[in-house]
Amino acid sequence: MWTHGPWQGRYLPHPLAPRERLRAYATWCNAVEGNTTFYATPSRATVETWAEQTPADFRFVLKLPKTITHERALGDVDVPLKAFLTAVEPLAERSHTLWIQLPPSFSPEHLGTLASFLRRLPREHRYAIEVRHRAFFENARAVQWLERVLGGIGAEWITFDTTVLFATPPRSEAEQEAWAKKPRMPRRLHALTANPVVRYIGRDDAEQTAEGWHPWADTVVGWLREGRSPTVFIHTPDNADALALARRFHDDVRARVPQVEPLTEPIPAEPPTLF
């Protein structure tokens, strides 16, 4: 995400060498979704540059490659899994959570496979699962089974909330595309661990997005007061204002929980002028 085109020159300095863009992004937000790792395992040298560009407390939530989760359906994955885990080693504690996104075809009948896969994972990492099959949101027994499997290794259940996106018909090209591609996922305001992960997608209208995140602000405030450490990602269909919106969400929460650390001052997109 730190190379997102609309941010260059608006939020992030431009031109800026690709190897410096993450450093600039990290002055805006203290966490990032590693979605590119879904398509290919990065080289260890690339991951080393990620570590060099970010402070020690920066959070990467990295998605496991689709070879593991979608193509091989969690079976016969020792080789690609080892390659991925080896590649991300340079991040050390920055590798906050490894994100296991499962396809819509992954249903409750596959929970045995998931349980077997999770038991084989090294315990030095934190894991979070994202499911998209409707049964996990509509069938109480399926919910109980999944939570029992995740509880076996202390894994989290990632929430991907698209309720605001689908609340009213799309009004922009980006929203139309999101309607075609994003799953219709309900809002699930529940954490299993001390480190919940939330993925919220609103609308291209900033105020509509901010209005829609009120339930999440309330929930995150509650989690913080319970001693949890949530990671929240704010998206819109075009993501043009996502950086500013993420900081706005952080400010909303911090206004109610002042103990939350302030974000760093972002580097300016343009150099200062004399006039």
Image (spheres, rainbow, N blue to C red):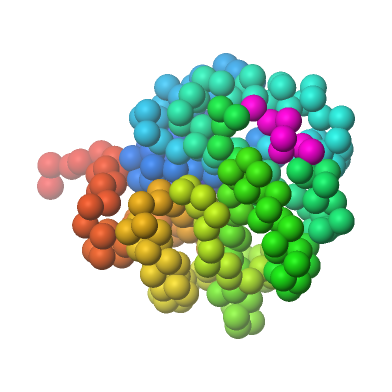
Depth check, front residue: 168 or 253: 253
Hey, which quadrant is residue 137 in on the image?
A: bottom right
Hey, which quadrant is residue 37 in on the image?
A: top right
Whether 23 is drawn above or below 12: the answer is above
**Which residue is at 36% across, 57% downward?**
226
191 lies left or right of 132? left
**Which residue is at 64% across, 19% downward?**
86
240 lies left or right of 262? right
**Which residue is at 76% across, 64% downward?**
142
Depth check, front residue: 22 or 141: 141
Is 118 one of the magenta-colored residues? Answer: yes
Question: Residue 108: image x %, image y %?
Answer: 82, 58
Residue 181 at least partly seen = no
Kindly give the residue lying farthest to the bottom in the view shown.
Answer: 168
Whether 39 is drawn above or below 4: the answer is above
Is 119 one of the magenta-colored residues? Answer: yes
Question: Residue 135: image x %, image y %?
Answer: 78, 67
Whether 212 is drawn above or below 272: the answer is below
**Which residue is at 70% across, 62% downward?**
144
Whether 108 is drawn above or below 149: the answer is below
In magenta, the rendered stretch is 116-122
Depth check, front residue: 178 or 15: 178
Question: Residue 145: image x %, image y %?
Answer: 74, 58
Question: Residue 39: image x %, image y %?
Answer: 72, 37
